[in-house]
Each structure stands twice: as structure tokens, then as C-alpha cells.
Image (cartoon, grey):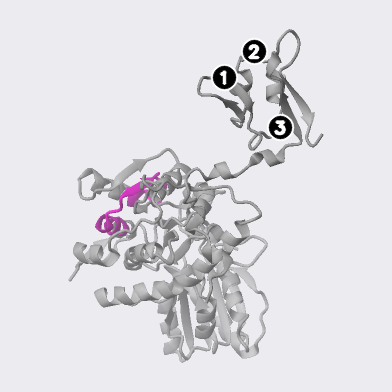
């Protein structure tokens, strides 16, 4: 007899695959989207420090890259903290889907 | 084989733990279980066991440490009573839901308020729905035997569920009785080597315990947990059969006493069953067909088996050493559930007795049996639930 679905679950809800949380794309929750403008960025890394989801990509040389939209939930902390250059923010929030 | 000794229930349980030699024990003292773990910590101090004893700052921490150690892949035990069990409440569910076969002697004691250190079943009954297996013991011998058997039941690969082994606080935990100890080598051989399942310390295969499971799978995990409990009675009986081969002492899901042809019966758990058996003998001598049923396995509760054992009885009194205020006693509710499957239903009454260690005396059993005789004759129940042995 084939097993029922609930009989196939790992005992005690143990997750047997390491690092599987990477598969959980929390970016799907986002309603506001941060937009990065490189020419206004002074590479202060405030956004990288403040991001609660490690959704700011950084190169091996320590240079800021664009957002990782798979995990960015759109909280807007980066946009708030961004000092920008000469009064112009490097990160602004936009409505998702626009 | 074995050795006959005069010991308390706590001493007997400490001896069983010594013979089993768990990998980790984490415990916090609470009357009347203190003495059990104090004796065991003596064995640790004297090098009689290899157990790592973790002395924690509360029972919540004790159960948390047990959960960690069990998830790491160890054979784990602790002991507690009353408020200690209440403080563990949150962690009890986590131990059971994570399928960690932790073993815990529970020395049954009343819950506060008012503050009381003596024996009743309020603590164990409060933990009824935690997902732990619960086994109740009448005396020190049963507590010792049940504790040894519980490791085999809980750790069985089809079960992997924690178990509480209950005995009445002070009445059993602190009274000296005749107990037959099993040889160390036989206990070791009976319990067997611990088999870890998904141990965290298997570093080559990393894994996570305690994930967030929401509406998509939680319901299914609970369904699986229920299924595991349905398998416990069969395993408990297999283990009991092996245990009987070793010791000659027979255990079932429950015990019956002169019940086969009984017209009236008392259902009661733990130490009060002993007193009741004496009075049943007296009534049998008078020609009254009285019998007793003493549940041993309370979780999972063997409804159908108990219904079968009680099916010929006309009137049943269920004696609860705990109350559900605004409801019937917890054991009465279970027996009612069992009776539901019967074609001809017996008349039933519920007596709350012995709260906070109030003595259960022979005259209380007599009072109940006299009432059952009347009910069996008339079929009329006046009061379903009453307190007995209460000062009026």
C-alpha cells in the first residue's frame, strides 16, 4: 500500500537538508521595491550594514552591487539610511509592479 | 536472579536510572522528586555512571537541556514533580513534537494554589495532551519496572516519543517497600544500546531541529504524531512480554482485579488501587461481585481494550485523584469515552478523592462500593460527580 503524504514527512519535523532556507525566496512578499542609482552611491555600505535580510550584494573587492531581489522584502531601511551624494539619494523606494 | 531490597520509590527509580546509565540527565530539584535525582547525582559523583549531569536553574531549562541532548543524539532522562512539570509545559510539547524519546519519572504531586507538596495527579493530568506517553505505577516495584520498560517503549524506532513514568508523591516516592531489583547486566541487556535517529552531532550530515511549519504542513505533522501514539500499546505489550520473561512480573495496558465476573467495579490509578483491592476482597467475602480496573497506560489511552474489560459490569465508579474544575475528573472522562463504544452502557459515577495527599482510607472504598451496589440494583445515579473523604 502506498504511503499517505503525512507518513512521508521526516520524523519530528527535522530538516535533513543543510542550507535549505536559501530556497525560501522571501522577496515574493515585497510590495515596495528599493531602486539603486549607482551614480548617487558613495559606497558607504550603510545599506549593507542595515539590511536585515543580507539582500545587498557585495563583490569580493567589497564594492556594492545591486540588490538581491530574491530575498529583499522591501522594508525600506536602506532607503531611509542612505546618505546619497549632494542631496540625491542612491536608494529610493518604488511601488512594486510599476 | 536479582536482589530483594527495602527501598523507597525514589530510591528504586534512581537505581533503575543507574542501571540504565543514560548519556545525559538535566534536572532541577523539586519535592518529592528531589530525592530521586539527588540519589542519582550521588551515583554520578561516585563514578557509578557515565552520565553527564547538567545542573540547571529551572525545570524549563532542565527540559530544554534534555531536548538539546536528545537532539544531539543521546539517551536522556530527568525527573520532576508538580510545579516543576508545570514550568516545563512549553518544552514538553517541543520534546514530543520533535520526537525525542526523553524519559522522565514524574513523582505526582498537587499543584499550587494553595501550596501543597503531597501526592495527587493534578500535575500529570495537566500534561495529558503534551504528546508524552504516560505510565502510572501503583507501588515502588511498578515504578522501577515501568521505568526500565519505558526506555524500550519510548526509544522503539516506530515510536520515538518521550515518556513519563508516574508514581504517587510521598505515598510511593518516600515509603519503604519490598522491591525486587534486576541484575545490572540484565537491565543493560533488556534496555539495549541506544540508537540515535537524526543526531545533531552527526556533523557530516547537518540538519535543523525546530523549524517553522505553518498552515501547509503543521496539520500533517500532528496527524503523524497521532499515528505514532496508536502504535504504542502494541509496543508496550511486546516490551511487557519480554519483561515478564526476564522477571516473571506481568504487565498489561491496565490491570484487572477480580473483574472477570464483577457486577460493580472501581476504576482507579496508582497507589489507591492497592487499598481498593483489599476492600474488594472484603466485599467478595460478603458475596458481592466487586472488581477493579487500574489503568497503567494513560497516554495513549486504550479505550477499546478497557471497554472490553468492563463490558459486563452494571455500575462503575471512577475515582480521580485530580479534578477538572467545572468538568468531570480526567479519568472519568476517559472511561466515559471507552464506555461510548459499548452496546449496553453501565451506570457511572465519578468520585474525586485524595487531593493534596488526603489519605484514601478503606471506608472511602466501602462508601463507593455500597453506592455501586445500590446503583446496580436500581440503575439510578443521583450525583454523577462528588468529592469523597472531604471534611463536611
Q: Percent position (x, y) of residue B354?
A: 50, 63
Q: Percent position (x, y) of residue B313?
A: 55, 87
Please state if B181 lies on the left or on the right of A35 as rendered: left
Find residue A74 and name its label.
3
Please report contact status of discs 2 and 1: CB closer than 8 Å, yes or no: no
State yes or no: residue B20 in magenta: yes
Q: Percent position (x, y) of residue B82?
A: 48, 52
Vertical order, B219 against B261 (above or below): above
Q: Which residue is mark 1?
A: A63
Q: Earlier in the sequence, mark 2 or mark 1?
A: 2
Vertical order, B251 against A71 (above or below): below
Query: Visible in this render: residue B252?
Result: yes
Q: What is the span of residues highlighted in magenta in the rendered image?
A: B13-37
Q: Chain of mark 1?
A: A
Examine the image and state in which quarter residue A78 appears.
Answer: top right
Find residue A42 and name its label.
2
Which of B51/A93 is in front?
Answer: A93
Amino acid at each position: 500500500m502506498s504511503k499517505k503524504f503525512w507518513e512521508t514527512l521526516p520524523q519530528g519535523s527535522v530538516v535533513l537538508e543543510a542550507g535549505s532556507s536559501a530556497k525560501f525566496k522571501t522577496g515574493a512578499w515585497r510590495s515596495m521595491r528599493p531602486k539603486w542609482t549607482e551614480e548617487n552611491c558613495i559606497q558607504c555600505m550603510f545599506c549593507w550594514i542595515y539590511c536585515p535580510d543580507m539582500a545587498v550584494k557585495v563583490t569580493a573587492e567589497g564594492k556594492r552591487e545591486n540588490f538581491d531581489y530574491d530575498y529583499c522584502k522591501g522594508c525600506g531601511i536602506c532607503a531611509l539610511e542612505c546618505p546619497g551624494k549632494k542631496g540625491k539619494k542612491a536608494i529610493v523606494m518604488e511601488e512594486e509592479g510599476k | 536472579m536479582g536482589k530483594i531490597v527495602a527501598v523507597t520509590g525514589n530510591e528504586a527509580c534512581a537505581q533503575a536510572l543507574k542501571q540504565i546509565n543514560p548519556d545525559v540527565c538535566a534536572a532541577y530539584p523539586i519535592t518529592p522528586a528531589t530525592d530521586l535525582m539527588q540519589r542519582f547525582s550521588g551515583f554520578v559523583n561516585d563514578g557509578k555512571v557515565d552520565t553527564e549531569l547538567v545542573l540547571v536553574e529551572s525545570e524549563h531549562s532542565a527540559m530544554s537541556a534534555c531536548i538539546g541532548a536528545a537532539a544531539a543524539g543521546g539517551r536522556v532522562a530527568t525527573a520532576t514533580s508538580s510545579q516543576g512539570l508545570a514550568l516545563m509545559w512549553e518544552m514538553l510539547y517541543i520534546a514530543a513534537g520533535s520526537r525525542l524519546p526523553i524519559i522522565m519519572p514524574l513523582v505526582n504531586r498537587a499543584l499550587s494554589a494553595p501550596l501543597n507538596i503531597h501526592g495527587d495527579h493534578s500535575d500529570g493530568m495537566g500534561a495529558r495532551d503534551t504528546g508524552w506517553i504516560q505510565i502510572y505505577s501503583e507501588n515502588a516495584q511498578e515504578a522501577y519496572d515501568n521505568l526500565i520498560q519505558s526506555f524500550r517503549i519510548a526509544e522503539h524506532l516506530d515510536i520515538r516519543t518521550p515518556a513519563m513514568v508516574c508514581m504517587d508523591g510521598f505515598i510511593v516516592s518516600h515509603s519503604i517497600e519490598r522491591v525486587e531489583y534486576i541484575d545490572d547486566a540484565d537491565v543493560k541487556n533488556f534496555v539495549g544500546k541506544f540508537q540515535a535517529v537524526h543526531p545533531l552531532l552527526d556533523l557530516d550530515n547537518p540538519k535543523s531541529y525546530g523549524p517553522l511549519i505553518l498552515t501547509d504542513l503543521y496539520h500533517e505533522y500532528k496527524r503523524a504524531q497521532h499515528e505514532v501514539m496508536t502504535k504504542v500499546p502494541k509496543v508496550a505489550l511486546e516490551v511487557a512480554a519480554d519483561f515478564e520473561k526476564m522477571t516473571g512480573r506481568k504487565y498489561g495496558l491496565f490491570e484487572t482485579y477480580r473483574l472477570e465476573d464483577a457486577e460493580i467495579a472501581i476504576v482507579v490509578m496508582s497507589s489507591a488501587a492497592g487499598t481498593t483491592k483489599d476492600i474488594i476482597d472484603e466485599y467478595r467475602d460478603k458475596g458481592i461481585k466487586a472488581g477493579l480496573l487500574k489503568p497503567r497506560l494513560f497516554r495513549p489511552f486504550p479505550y477499546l481494550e478497557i471497554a472490553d474489560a468492563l463490558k459486563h459490569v452494571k455500575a462503575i465508579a471512577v475515582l480521580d485523584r485530580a479534578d477538572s474544575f467545572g468538568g468531570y475528573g480526567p479519568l472519568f472522562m476517559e472511561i466515559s469515552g471507552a464506555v461510548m463504544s459499548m452496546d449496553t452502557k453501565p451506570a457511572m459515577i465519578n468520585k474525586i478523592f485524595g487531593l493534596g495527599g488526603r489519605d484514601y482510607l478503606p471506608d472511602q472504598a466501602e462508601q463507593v462500593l455500597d453506592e455501586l451496589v445500590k446503583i446496580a440494583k436500581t440503575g439510578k445515579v443521583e450525583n454523577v460527580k462528588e468529592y469523597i473523604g472531604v471534611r463536611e
